[in-house]
Image: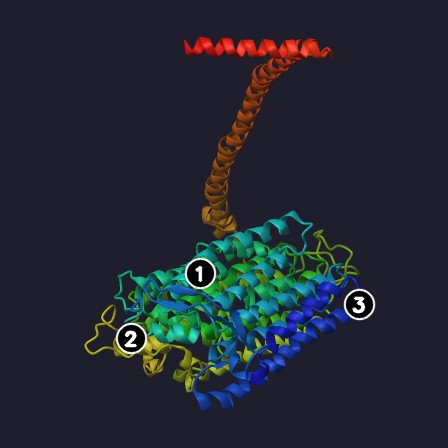
Amino acid sequence: MLKLIWLIPALPLLSALVLGIFGRTLKLSEKTISWIACGSVFLSLVISIGAVYEFATSYWPTHGRPYLSREAGGFPHSFTWVPGGEARLTWGPEAGTTVPLRIEWSYQLDQLSAVMILVVTFVGFWIHVFSIGYMRGDGGFYRFFAQMNLFMFMMLVLVMSSNFLMMFVGWEGVGLCSYLLIGYYFHWNYAAYASKKAFIVNRVGDFGFLLAMFAIFSLFGTLQFTEVMELAKNDAYLPQEAFGMWGLASWIALGLFIGATGKSAQIPLYVWLPDAMAGPTPVSALIHAATMVTAGVYMVTRTNVIFQKSPTMMFVVALVGVATAVWAASMGFTQTDIKKVLAYSTISQLGYMFLACGVGAFAAGIFHLYTHAFFKALMFLGAGSVIIALHHEMDMRRMGGLARFMPITYRTFLAGWLAICGIPLFSGFFSKDEILWRTFSTEVIPGGRWLWLLGFLGAGMTAFYMTRLVALTFWGEPRFVVAGGGGASHEHGAHAGHQVRESPRVMTIPLIVLAVGATVSGFIGWPESLGGTNRFEKWLEPVIWHRAPEPGGLGFGHGPTAAAHEALVGVGAHAEAHSAMEYVLMLASIALAAGVMYGCAILYLRRRDRLEAIVRAIRPLYVASANKYWVDEFYEGVFVRGLALGLSRFSWRVDARGVDGGVNGSAWMTVFWSKVSGWFDLYVVDFIVNAIGAMMKLFSTVFRMAQTGFAQNYALVITTGLFLLTAVYLILSW
């Protein structure tokens, strides 16, 4: 199967082309479109499983290195994408030398990309299946699946690429597909606005990624991941920096991280993700929960060597991550749109992933990415099931009591809720606890315990707003009118006269599958402190750099100590995990989550009066959270209407008064000189010509008189002429 890995992205691409070109022309039925779209993703999933199995059981034990598709030999497995040309290196020990510019289109399969392709294809397949029911009857059915499959192709190229430039193609490709899918309902002004906002904000981050890629090539002379990471380990190319220092490694890592903050919606580039909920709910599940938004975490982990060379940037990554986790969670408290609550939850959970990367626990970050894909995709699809049942209602204030009407959706949603809250034995418990423990015990950067405290606070906030979502949506009395009685409320909602029913099997089966994943997917990372082996971490060890500690190292800046080394690479860190401290922190996390969940449920179901009293007491904070702290308005005023509009007006003035003025001035000069030349032609040139003509006419008239036709007259003229010539000669010779 390894030689067939090129088919993993190729099959969704082929499906996208077929549906995009022929879907409308041939008037393909929804059933045919569904089979083509879902079938291609299913085949990609099968090939992915086979390729990963072959890599794990045969290739890696034999070769001990990543598999590159070029080993299969030639197109379509691999080919030279950018041939020819030379470039001069700017930095490093080989500065001033020229290297050939040759970039391959080839795929790389290692432990990290294996995790990603399995997540993308597995979760993507079940979201595709769910979409069949969700999008049924939509006029753009073929267009939706064509764009979804194009996204699958771009995402798979991103995670399977063997070099930075190829990754950048997938990186920009998923941005394009995100733009198309967010704006799927393009006749809605809000959807059009949201798609443009997402596209522009991501381009800001991509500029940093692009600059970092230029710097990488100028330093290493190659863009291949395996070659760059190997050279980056050499201090001659990329010196190890001390904490607080800012060198070449920091600048490159900063550019990469700016790109990651845009794609993974971190401070300050997170503002596009909540608005991205304007797209269909399956789009939110696939792109904005399980796959695309995790690309930043994947990229940071892929380039972990560069980040580890800069403890300063590691601290920045951790700080931005934990700040985003708490900041986004605080906005999730007050949102009433069910999808926007999940959007802020996604931003917050991505913050935990970056926190893990910042403290050196890259494997823990990817582990949370893996578990998050299951439970967050599950909750988005569960929200989609509710939205369809309530005829596209998304305001949780008009829901309630849905547990009795939609038992499958409710029970599966509970699995995602318990997972994200960190309840033991559910997947989120294992990954979130791993991140919090590694943050508390890190020696890679200073301030680990303060970062843990913020992460711990964020976990409690997550438990609150997610319990609030469940309570408002599924518990209590219905806040809508149900046809035929059976629990009808006295309030007149938007769904009066409609019977709320469970979603069809094509939508509930993916919910059940993902609920199972949200429940058991964390077992693969069972920690050593609880008697496990943490197979997930051991699987990722080959792609995480193991920097050897320097003799006499003092930690931050003089080379990692042994403890720092363990925290950095995740090897042997759980030797300390058996201490009482880890158990105390684990129990504290569980107690916090359970206590907050219980308290929130009581407030929303039995003590609404107390809840309202609390809201009144903190009214300013509530209003600020509900308005998302006016960050969008700030960006609108400062950057859009201020900087961008100011620059556009300045540019217009330069164009109108400078460029257009120059053009108009040249036109005036042309007209002026044309008038001058016309006058000169009329009164000077024409005068001279006419004068010459008149003289010629005069002379011709005179000479014509002598032309009588008589020989004697001609003899007289000749004689007179000779006389005059003789006279002139004599006068001149006198």
Residue 623 in percent (x, y) is at 50, 47
Q: Which mark is residue 461?
A: none
Disc 1 residue type (three-letter): Phe
Disc 3 residue type (three-letter): Ser
Q: Nearer the viewer, residue 642 or 614?
A: 642
Labelled pair 2, 1 in contact (Cβ < 8 Å): no
CA gap between label 2 and label 3 equals 59 Å
The residue wearing badge 2 is 564
Residue 304 in percent (x, y) is at 39, 71
How packed mark 3 is, by other alpha carbons closer than 10 Å (few <14, some 14-19, many 20 or more), is: few
Residue 101 appears anywhere in the view: yes
Numbered disc 1: secondary structure: helix
Q: Nearer the viewer, residue 406 or 151?
A: 151
Residue at 47% x, 36% y: name it.
650
Disc 2 residue type (three-letter): Ala
Residue 226 in percent (x, y) is at 42, 76
Q: Nearer the viewer, residue 216 or 563?
A: 216
Left or right side of 109 for 246? left
Left or right side of 72 for 550? left
Q: Which mark is residue 209?
A: 1
Residue 491 in percent (x, y) is at 70, 52
Q: Quadrant of the C terminus?
A: top left
